[in-house]
Image (tube, rainbow, N blue to C red):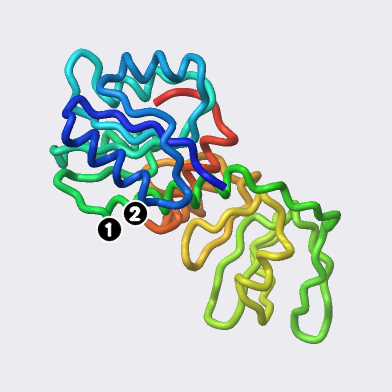
Amino acid sequence: MKLATIVIDDEPIALEKLKNYVNKVPFLSLASACQSGFEAMEFLATNDVDLIITDINMPDLSGMDFVKSITSNHPLVIFTTAYAQYAVDSYKVNAVDYLLKPYGFVEFQRAVNKALEQFSARNAAPQQSQLESLFVKTDYRYVRVPLADIRFIKGYGEYLQLYLVGSNSPLLTLSSFAAIKTRLTSDFLQIHRSYIVNMNHVQQVERGRVVLDADNAIPVGDSFKPDLQLFLQTNGIGKK
């Protein structure tokens, strides 16, 4: 699998560097190298790409405005910039990462690895599972729990706490996230090292936390933010 990649930078030396780096990565395929957002628009009008790597600060049309103008295909995006203050803006358009100039191949490789991970997750075939419930062992009995009734799961030492619809007390079982994740559907998303959430029970996502109700607002761990952003991008509508 190779990601068709377009690189954009108005500075010839910087553009040549991007081309060389792309050609060094086995899972990237250079589709085009452009010196402006307008040139890239012309290419994308007749070609699809998987990944865009673009400078932000360019004359006439900034890289940020160029990305916002894309309405189809929704390729992954990595920004390059000489200005650290653009980092926050880059995440507002769901960028995979940003590279602060001057950057080296190690930083470039790290960023495109993230892109590959997101691309693989986006295009993974949905799990074919007929499971609608789990039999959860608690004390000396097995309790059947419909997956739809699980609001969220909390890791608690060597145990899991399953918080269910209509119950004030969690169901406690001796197990691990690794074990239970193989039994869950794609509606469940790990958003923190200690929490898996059934997104069907989420009221809103705001300010780095997932809100289920007035009493349960769960923080999103930094390493899980890309997965949450991808879920929202895949299952949501609206522009920032």
- Dot 2: few (<14), some (14–19), or many (≥20) neighbours within 10 Å? some
Residue 111 at what x, y percent from top left? 35, 50
- Asked which quadrant contains residue 22, the reply is top left
Q: How many marks?
A: 2
Q: Which mark is residue 106?
A: 1
**Label 2: which residue?**
109
Circles 1 and 2: CB distance less than 8 Å? Answer: yes
With 83 as the anchor, is 65 left or right in this view? right
Identity of the residue drawn at 67% across and 82% down: 174
Position of 108 relative to 63 (above/below): below
Q: Residue 213 location in percent, x, y?
A: 54, 47
Tell me: 21 left or right of 142.
left
* Residue depicted at x 29% and y 29%: 8
Asked whether 119 or 195 is in front, the reply is 119
Q: Amino acid at mark 2?
A: Gln
Instruction: Indicate the position of residue 114 as horizontal and vertical percent values.
Output: 42, 51
Q: Given the image, on which type of amino acid does mark 1 rest?
A: Val
Image coordinates for residue 79, horizontal then vertical, percent = 29, 37
Say which of 219 and 31 sits in front: 31
Q: Nearer the viewer, residue 103 or 153?
A: 103
Q: Is residue 182 above or below residue 104?
A: below
Q: Secondary structure at mark 1?
A: helix
Q: Taking 14 as reference, is 142 above or below it?
A: below
As measured in the structure, the alpha-carbon distance from the residue carrying label 1 to the one carrying label 2 is 5 Å
- Quadrant in the picture for residue 149: bottom right
The C terminus sits in image quarter: top left
Which label is found at residue 75?
A: none
Determine whether the residue tagged by mark 2 lies in a helix, strand or loop: helix
The residue at the point 53 percent across, 63 percent down is: 195
